[in-house]
Amino acid sequence: MNKVLFVDDEKNILSSIRRQMRNHFTVLTAESGAEGLQHLLEQPDIKVVVSDMRMPEMDGVQFLRQVAERAPDTIRLMLTGHADMNATVGAVNEGRIFRFLLKPWDNDVLLAAVEAAMRQHQLIHAERELLEKTVSGIVELLVEVMAIFDPNAVGRGSRIRRLSRRLAEEIGLPEPWQLELAATLSTLGCITLPPEILQQLRENKPLADGDMQLYNQHPQRASRLLRHIPRLDVVSGMIAAQQGRFLLEKPVTALREPELIAFGGHAVGMLLALDEKQQQGGNPEALLKEMAGNSKQYDPTLVAELQNIYASGFMNERHVMLAELKPGMVLKQPIYSTTGALIMPAGQQFSGVLIERLNAFAQRTPISEPMLVVVPN
């Protein structure tokens, strides 16, 4: 049954609400804002929160503001016996209230409001699921196109894709798919570079000043390409900002859109820097320790989160046969044919389509097995 949390400092009101709502929802109650926040911490599947306005120590505006920061997916309602316009405006602006109801309430009106809040929660999640599936399909298509033009660039995005998603979830980004997509397509602009520059990059040869300037513009080119796709404004902004710096000084849920874009861009840039050093033989734990000592260049909060992720055993290496490949695995070492020809460079993240293509190729030309892959936890 759907969970709803009611917060009020008057026990008799909470008792009345429990009696009215218990046959419709799983009802949780709290007599203070602090107790309500503890419920949210222990039961993150709470969908709706209804709070009284006037409470000691932490009023309804302060409480719902923290709810919005800590559990942004909850739908928030306010109950009050005081029709105070300033309080109403503060609650709507700071707590992002879905409905505002006056005491004494009509039982049917309150029940209808909570049911509407539940439907709103379902709509938000249904829209998000649809958007993520649509975006996922777009990503797979773009990655396949990128692989034709520049497999090396695809490898970089693929290697940091899963790590970016985990980082976004651990740090509490409301829409973790945005950072994941920005990381995956961070090198999309490289497909616009002249073939000779791409070849030099593949061979790790230094670029002339003019070519380097052209290469450094690839994030802006990728951003312009993605702006034509609806709902990807934040993602394209993050990609354009990947060479910037940002210091996280408040919860990510409280970031305004320009700050979120700058933060995401910095995170993508940091993941790319970490990946580049790993490809040169660096150990991720040692590299992150080095980054931690350079707080002017790398945000300390992001570095600490990445250290925790790696400490948890995020990436495991394994040798697998072709038949054992699964989507999400990342190729650790290049794949060669049995005659020594390069088939696939390291860094590719396997999708269902890529596995099918590799199987089709192997039916014509035998490949060397087993393959060393990274299996994310």
Image (cartoon, rainbow, N blue to C red):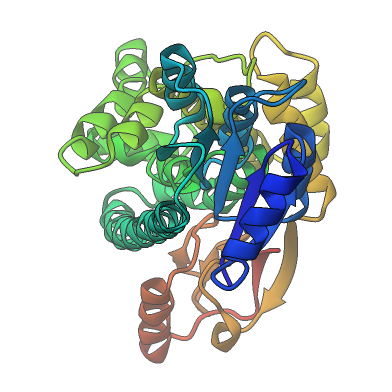
Does residue 82 appear anywhere in the picture? yes
Taking the image as shown, residue 297 lies to the left or right of residue 154, namely right
Q: Quadrant of the N terminus?
A: bottom right
Q: How far across and down, in percent of the image, does residue 233 sit?
A: 28, 33
Q: Residue at x 75, y 62 (%)?
A: 316
Q: Residue at x 55, y 77 (%)?
A: 326
Tell which residue pokes out farthest to the top in this image. Answer: 296
Q: How far across and down, in percent of the image, does residue 253 sit?
A: 55, 31
Tell which residue pokes out farthest to the left in this image. Answer: 228
Question: Quick one: 164 or 234, which is closer to the camera?
Answer: 234
Q: How far across and down, in percent of the image, does residue 130 sit?
A: 32, 62
Q: Is residue 294 above or below residue 23?
A: above
Q: Residue at x 63, y 30 (%)?
A: 66
Q: Is residue 223 above or below residue 328?
A: above
Q: Is residue 223 above or below residue 57?
A: below
Question: Quick one: 371 or 29, which is closer to the camera?
Answer: 29
Q: Quadrant of residue 18?
A: bottom right
Taking the image as shown, residue 28 lies to the left or right of residue 263, namely right
Question: Quick one: 350 or 66, which is closer to the camera?
Answer: 66
Does residue 276 appear anywhere in the picture? no
Q: Residue at x 45, y 22 (%)?
A: 83
